[in-house]
Amino acid sequence: MNSKTGILAIFRREWQLITSSKICIWGMMVAPLLSMVLLLWMMDSGLPSRIPIAVVDLDNTPTSRKLIRQLDAFEKTNIEYKSLSFKEARHQMEQMKVFAVLTIPENFARDAVSGNRPKLVYYTNNAFLISGSLLFQDLKTISTLASASVGLQTAQAKGFTVNQVMPILQPITIDSHPIGNPWLNYSLYLNNVILPGILQLIILIFTVSAFGYDIKAQNGRSLLKMGNNSILKVVIGKLLPYTLIFLVIALFFMSVLYYYNRFPLGNGFLPMFFNYLLLILAAQGVGVIILAIFKNYRFALSVASLIGMVSFSIAGFSFSTLAMDGSLSALSNLFPLRHFFLIYIDQALNGIPVGYSMYQYAALLAFVLLSLFFLRPVKKLLEDDIYEL
């Protein structure tokens, strides 16, 4: 066997190109690790807490002050400012010093007891979706509690007991049990999908670049000669170093997420390991398909970047595919990250039998098998050895 030809020779050649390229080192190794550190640090508390808000208390009575103390006791809310006017509070929101404003009107306590139905007015800054949504929940809760408290005081003043009034104020009690993520931990839910999504984006870009580099340098024919004119040997030899590097990064992700941070891993190591492995292979398969379809290296690179970015939106972890238009819901199945996400939910969070995820595993494998039908156009690109601007 000639040591200068075959899969091993191409592997060594590609490995030397990777280790001598600053772009490869920073893009493939440093970027995903920095992303992991940054995202885990940003979401270290799991759920945002002590979000600053402003309160405009125009009533300034014991009732309104008690309401403010109750709101400030909520874990997610921090009353940073007590303004004398709504104009001042709005200015603080525009400067992003606060993310919500609660206004308690004049004569709030008197009107509440007399049955004049005063209005609590609150504004949330939903340009920041998470903080705006969390503050909206707290403000809505405190409004409901204030209404119930006033109703209870009024009823007691009329001679009713607490046991008589509570079934009217709260006819239905809620016993909530969040499944899969009972801590409502954003880091647990988001980082387990965002990090693989970043990894998929990087894989798509570098898979296209791996072949695009040789096309641009007009090394296609010599590469085919090194692979004994077998495009399958060329593809395996070129992509294997990337596969190994990305697999090591995936194992590092798993070590930090599941063993250091103790995130749920319902069915153990192997189901999620194969999930990462198949995601890497599927993303490489999609990269080969993109290059074969679009043929132009620069255009294929742009499409790969676009698909990697769209994956975050269409995978279904930030907005359910069930709520999407039917065509978009069906289209989501053409993105590897979608199937990775479903496996993660079933195997890591819910811990259901692996057999229920076989369709998703098969879908990821299908991307790899489908790419085999696109090897001939890639071979033609290497044979032509023409770099299109």
Image (cartoon, rainbow, N blue to C red):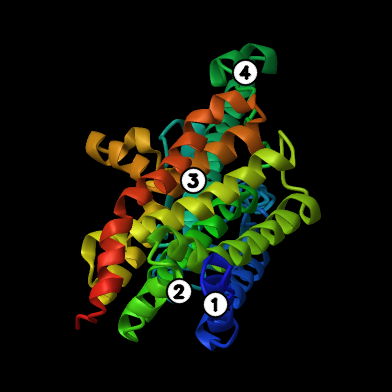
Find out whether the residues at labels 4 and 2 contact each other: C-beta distance under 8 Å.
Answer: no
Find numbered disc 3 in the image and state the secondary structure of the residue it sits on. Answer: helix
Find numbered disc 1 in the image and state the secondary structure of the residue it sits on. Answer: loop
Identity of the amino acid at label 4? Answer: Met
Residue 4's disc is 1
Camera-side residue: 228 or 282?
A: 228
Residue highlighted by disc 4: 166
Find out whether the residues at labels 1 and 2 contact each other: C-beta distance under 8 Å.
Answer: yes
Which comes before the other along the chain, label 1 or label 2?
Answer: 1
Find numbered disc 2 in the image and state the secondary structure of the residue it sits on. Answer: helix
Q: Horizontal and vertical percent for residue 98?
A: 51, 67
Identity of the amino acid at label 1? Answer: Lys
Can residue 387 be spotted in the picture?
A: yes
Residue highlighted by disc 3: 108
The C terminus: image quadrant: bottom left
Point out the frontmost of discs 3 and 1: 1
Which comes before the other along the chain, label 3 or label 4?
Answer: 3
Q: Is residue 260 above or below residue 303?
A: above
Which comes before the other along the chain, label 4 or label 1?
Answer: 1
Identity of the amino acid at label 3? Answer: Phe
Q: Horizontal and vertical percent for residue 197?
A: 49, 57
Relative placement, left or right, of 88 versus 35 is: left
Residue highlighted by disc 2: 226
Cα distance in 3D space between marks 3 and 2: 83 Å
Q: Residue at x 46, y 39 (%)?
A: 111
Dot 4 alpha-carbon crowd within 10 angstroms: few under 14, some 14 to 19, many 20 or more = some
Question: What residue occupies the far front of the structure in this picture?
Answer: 1
